[in-house]
Amino acid sequence: MKTASHLLLRGSSWCFRRRVMGTSKMVIQIPLGVTNEQEARRIAVRLSDEMNDIFERLLRSDTELPDDIVAAYFDYCLRKVTQDLTKQRRKKRMSGSFSDDDKKIEEMRLIVMRQMSEDGLSHTLPIHRVAEFSTPEELEMAMIIHGQQYKLVMSSLKRPHFKAAASIATRTKDRSSSHESQLLEAYLHATTAAMEAVTDRPAAMTAAARARASELVVQRSKVAVSGSHAPRVVTAEAPTDAPVSITPTAPLLTSGVEVISIPITHSLLDAQFQAAAASTDTHDLERSPKTSPFAHDLAGVCERSIRRAQADGRMDDKTALGRRMSVKLFIFITDQQLVTRVEQHHIRIFMNALKSLPANFLKSESDRSLTYPEVAARASTLSDDKLGRSAGTSNRHLDTIGAIVKYARVQDKIDVDRDIDTSSLRVPENTRSRNKRVAFKHQDVLKLFRHPIWTGCKGKERRHAKGNNVIQDGLYWVPLIIHYTGARFEEIAGMPVSAIIQEGEHWGLDISPHTERRLKNIQSERLLPIHEHLVSLGLIRHQLNMVKVREEFMFPELRPAHAKSKFAKKMKYNWDKARRIQLGASADDLTMHSLRHYVNITLKADKSIEKSVRMDILGHAAEDFNEEVYSSGTPFDDKLKAINAIPRAF
């Protein structure tokens, strides 16, 4: 038996084996159903993280939430419920629709909520409360209102605002039933207190108004007027050396969003952004910022910018996820949650921090519960090659922050720092664009496609061992198609079955965006002729087989499990291993994009192929403005001739 990282090899298949925390003999063993050790290790890491989370939740289930956490949640609920009830009551009172019946119902709701706070939740009015109502009419009203309030409480707790507040207060989404009970109790008491406060509010406001009126009368008496034409004399009070107390203005926040007052984690930011996305403030964009100003929290600004861009058709879901990730990372590092407080030095801190951030940060779900100091401490133990972000990635984050600040200033008319200049903080590229990726040479191509994936392997689970099985799936087809078209990795890996169309006597690939795969830019949308070798290998037959079994995509096994992932990810392991086996030390430099680069160089070397044809095949915009605007596009036959000039891979 061979063991490593909770792995156990039984026969030819790997198992996950781990002792239950806190016990000496209890062991959990899970067959992984894989024979490849590297794949087993990846699964084991994920299982280990999930098991740690389960053990942590089990340990938490025996403890109670600290009083300060419950108090923070109580404060939020009290503010939110008071705000909502005040708006509802004011609207009725000021419109003249607040009747005597409404007053009776309001009083009965308060009685019922006081009972719920004392007795706890129940579907129906508790038996011991029946005697408290003097008439059958009152009892009937109490029973009806009790049922209504029960449903209202249960539905309110599921609203994004309260769920987000609970996550922010407890710093986790995974709470034990004991913790949920504590929060529910706090919500009931907060709702009862809010109802009492709102009921007393008109009288309190009347008293405050009278007091204020008295102040104004006293101030006015200081102004002496002698006759209708006499000048006004205002008595000035003697100067005082006492310091002037200025009450800071509370920040304007998106409805449902709370400023995180405890150490920030990505789990807390997730909850904050979810609350911002669900808020009615985010949905109501067509209003005047002068009469109805927009909130200043970065979460709200980010979600509003996404909503507006998507409404205009300028942003897809994956780009939106990337924008949220950049803004969350900025808040996580700088602790700045309001766009009005962002200054140039905050962005400089952010860009410097990206250089020392662990390269694999947020790859594991457990990272989302870490604070920035904890991440920085972990980074200090890592070697330089495991830290930082590429220049391109860092600059994309920078551009996003710049775009958010600009959106707040231009669209929302928020008073942000106008001296912010992100261009001065860009990370310089160390390599010219043409040298960023190494291109395949023809001999490299021939060597690569002699791998068992294309010549014959042992079977589906043994793609790298020589055999007699040629399995024509995504791993087989995607590199070949890219070799013969120069298309991008994701363009081919995410092709729907409808992408292959007949063009006269020939076949083409319709490269178009769809709901699960976007394109890089508008010129990426194009029709690519299919190389004659791909046709003879059976690509059209593969499409027909996929249609027959009602598959949506050409390579369904590559379909990502969630929106954040890519089609290409599912074949990355075997593709990387095939390159290493065939190309040795040079494999790291020769990526899938290197095949695209190879096609570009091959077409460029053929002087009979015009530049415009090559640009159309690769999905590049014309360099000349006149060519781009007034060109009618390359005829299909011209592109077919160019593509068929690409040498065969085997």
Image (cartoon, grey):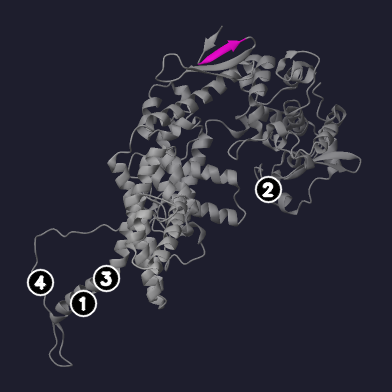
Q: Distance between the residues labelled 1 and 3?
A: 12 Å
Q: Which residue is drawn at 41% across and 17% down?
A: 23
Q: Residue at x 41, y 34 (%)?
A: 369
Label 2 vs label 3, nearer the camera: 3
Asked if the residue at tag 3 contacts the one at tag 2, i.e. Cβ–Cβ closer than 8 Å, the answer is no
Horizontal relation, residue 189 to residue 222: left or right:
right
Q: In which quarter of the image is residue 348?
A: top left
Residue at label 1? 213
Q: How far apart are marks 2 and 1 (CA)?
A: 64 Å
Mark sitting earlier along the chain (3/4): 3
Mark sitting earlier along the chain (2/3): 3
Dot 1: element: helix
Can you tell which mark lies on residue 205?
A: 3
Mark sitting earlier along the chain (2/4): 4
Q: What residue type is labelled 2?
A: Ile
Q: Residue at x 58, y 16 (%)?
A: 15
Residue at label 2? 522
Label 4 vs label 1, nearer the camera: 1
Asked if the residue at tag 3 contacts the one at tag 1, i.e. Cβ–Cβ closer than 8 Å, the answer is no
Dot 4: element: loop
Give x and y (percent) for residue 219: 16, 77
Asked if the residue at tag 1 contacts the one at tag 4, i.e. Cβ–Cβ closer than 8 Å, the answer is no
Asked whether 439 or 225 is in front, the reply is 225
Which SS type dominates the magenta stretch?
A: strand
Q: How far apart are marks 3 and 4 (CA)?
A: 30 Å
Residue at label 4? 237
Q: Residue furthest toward the top?
A: 1
